[in-house]
Image (cartoon, rainbow, N blue to C red):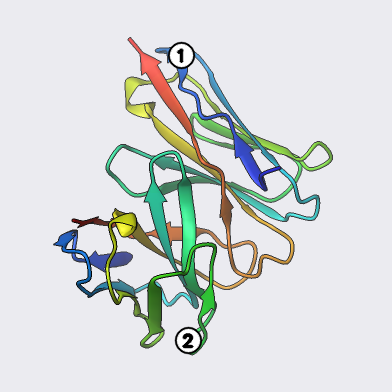
Amino acid sequence: NAGVTQTPKFQVLKTGQSMTLQCAQDMNHNSMYWYRQDPGMGLRLIYYSASEGTTDKGEVPNGYNVSRLNKREFSLRLESAAPSQTSVYFCASREAGSYYEQYFGPGTRLTVT
Amino acid sequence: QKEVEQNSGPLSVPEGAIASLNCTYSDRGSQSFFWYRQYSGKSPELIMSIYSNGDKEDGRFTAQLNKASQYVSLLIRDSQPSDSATYLCAVSLTGGGNKLTFGTGTQLKVEL
């Protein structure tokens, strides 16, 4: 099993450009998450999907959109990138319910110039 | 008050010593607690989960949970330089649905 995979690993965008970050998991998990991590800020939840067909905003959703394409895949889209979106983005998945662990993908390092 | 709080460190311990990492949380109804290790430039890796009061041991790691005092700790015995990383505490808060709330992490440095 590959676990949680993310593409791309690195990306440089110019301000105003758009892009989609892809995430897939092969653990048959119901819930999937997108986080950003900035120095001193910890992990901040952008959006999550508790189950296929549902998505909800997290702590910092502005400037982002998500699509839960199917049970395996959860994508994050930046419609018009801004320098403030320079960050490391992590996707994670988890089985539904409080007692289940969350597993992370390797991350995407995004720079917006 | 933050929902999950950790001392940012760095916490420096000599090789072979016990490292003690602490985390407090605000929601008394929280049910599950996790410790993640994150090396610089890498993604968080789950190392321990704990759900009941008391201690849970796994190799050199021991997680301790005290729900009455609302804290969870991680002890690392016989610390090695390879344990140098940032340790993140995560809590499943009441009403948080399927979300985990993370602390900002404690940086651990194990010195030779």
Q: Is residue A88 visible?
A: no
Looking at this view, is A59 or A70 the one in front? Answer: A59
Examine the rendered structure and indicate whether residue A105 appears above or below residue A32.
above
- Give me the chain letter of mark 2: A
**Could you say where residue A88 lies in the image, as x and y percent from the top left?**
31, 53
Q: Residue at the spot x=72%, y=37% of the render?
A: B71
Q: Measure how far apart labels 2 and 1 are at the Cα level.
A: 45 Å
Examine the rendered structure and indicate whether residue A108 appears above or below residue B81.
below
Q: Residue at the spot x=53%, y=17% of the render?
A: B18
Q: Residue at the spot x=39%, y=18% of the render?
A: B110
| Residue B93 position by quadrant | bottom right
Circle 1 Cα neighbour tier, 10 Å, few/some/many (<14 / 14–19 / ≥20): some
Inspect the image, locate mark 1, and give the three-letter code of the amino acid beneath it. Answer: Val
- Which element type, helix, strand or loop, lies under badge 1? strand
**Could you say where residue B33 lies in the image, as x and y percent from the top left?**
63, 49
Identify the residue under disc 1.
Answer: B13
Inspect the image, locate mark 2, and give the three-letter code of the amino acid beneath it. Answer: Glu
Which mark identifies residue A27?
Answer: none
Q: Is residue A111 visible?
A: yes
Q: Residue at the spot x=28%, y=56% of the render?
A: A83
Q: Is residue B17 left or right of residue A105?
A: right
| Quarter of the figure that contains the C terminus of chain A | bottom left
**Could you say where residue A10 lies in the image, as x and y percent from the top left?**
17, 57
Identify the residue under disc 2.
Answer: A52
